[in-house]
């Protein structure tokens, strides 16, 4: 069964983009906001996530991994 994750505000479907603002509670998304619905503050946070975090979804749970740049 595929889990559909949608924007908490406009219900747009999320397809794994890291520039969405995702609030997690033990790997389960409690709030997820698409770029169009983000406030400037939320957008800044999402930009940081996109630069530093890799997002993947498995069985409806979101896993976020730190992106490390090796020296
Ligand atoms: Zn939205």
Image (cartoon, rainbow, N blue to C red):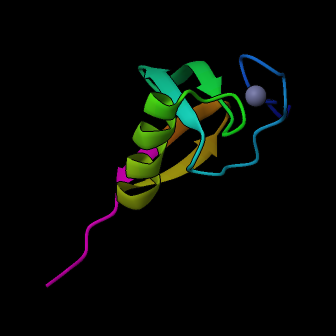
Give the side of residue 9 with respect to residue 52, left or right.
Answer: right
Q: Position of residue 65 (x, y in %)?
A: 38, 51
Q: Is residue 60 magenta?
A: no
Q: Is residue 58 above or below residue 65?
A: above
In this view, 19 is above or below 59: below
Magenta span includes 68: yes
Q: Residue at x 62, y 41 (%)?
A: 58
The reply, left or right, for residue 33 in relation to residue 39 is right
The image shows residue 51 at horizontal and vertical percentages of: 40, 60
Q: Main secondary structure of the magenta part?
A: loop
Please tell me in which quarter of the rendered image ligand 1 is found.
top right
The answer to whether residue 43 is visible is yes
Horizontal side, residue 2 vs residue 20: left or right: right
Which residue: 35% across, 57% down? Answer: 52
Residue at (33, 63) in percent of width and height: 67
Q: Position of residue 36 (x, y in %)?
A: 72, 36
Quarter of the figure with the C terminus: bottom left
Q: Quadrant of residue 57?
A: top right
Tell which of 9 and 2 is nearer to you: 9
Residue at x 55%, y 27% (from the top left corner): 39
Q: Does residue 6 appear in the picture of this structure? A: no
Out of 25 and 52, give the one closest to the viewer: 52
The answer to which image quadrant residue 9 occupies is: top right
Please tell me which residue lies in front, 21 or 16.
Answer: 21
Q: Which residues are magenta?
A: 64-71
């Amino acid at each position: 069964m595929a889990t559909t994750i949608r924007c908490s505000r406009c219900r747009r479907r999320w397809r794994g983009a890291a520039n969405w603002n995702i609030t997690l509670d033990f790997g389960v998304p409690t709030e997820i906001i698409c770029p169009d619905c983000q406030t400037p503050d939320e957008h800044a946070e999402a930009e940081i996530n996109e630069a530093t975090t890799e997002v993947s979804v498995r069985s409806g749970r979101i896993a976020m991994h730190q992106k490390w740049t090796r020296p």
